[in-house]
Image (tube, grey):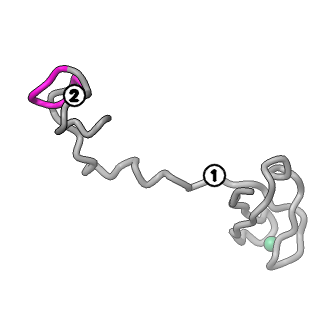
Amino acid sequence: MAIYEYQCAECGAAFQARRAMKDADAPITCPDCGSFQAKRGLSRFFSATSGGGNSGVSTSGGGGCASCSGHSCASCGGH
Ligand SMILES: [Zn+2]
């Protein structure tokens, strides 16, 4: 099961519904107006990493950290 976002084409209400993946695009009723015109919207989940600009990425640009060229020393933390 996953949570999907929908927006009603009739009244514009946005709502979320928890559905099986196979039902994600199946028709769903708007809880506000009862219309069947709700369409699945863009999912927002896990999008918080975009635009944060504060993820602690090193400036060396090569992966790895300053003290190694691989990704395996203690300060790399395994990324
Ligand atoms: Zn509606």
Image location (x, y in percent) of residue 71 = 26, 27
- In the image, taking residue 45 as reference, residue 70 lies left or right, namely left
Q: Does the residue labelled 1 lie within 8 Å of ligand 1?
A: no
Mark 2: amino acid: Gly
Q: Nearer the viewer, residue 68 or 28?
A: 68
Quarter of the displayed picture in which ligand 1 can be seen: bottom right
- In the image, taking residue 19 as reference, residue 43 lies left or right, namely left
Mark 2: which secondary structure?
loop
Image location (x, y in percent) of residue 72 = 25, 28
Inspect the magenta stretch and tell me whether residue 42 lies in it. Answer: no
Inspect the magenta stretch and tell me whether residue 68 lies in it. Answer: yes
Q: Which of 23 and 9 is in front in this view?
A: 23
Magenta highlight range: 62-69
Q: Is the magenta stretch mostly helix, strand or loop?
A: loop
Q: To which residue does mark 1 refer?
A: 42
Image location (x, y in percent) of residue 58 = 18, 36
Mark 1: amino acid: Leu
Q: To which residue does mark 2 refer?
A: 64
Question: In terms of image quadrants, where is residue 4?
Answer: bottom right
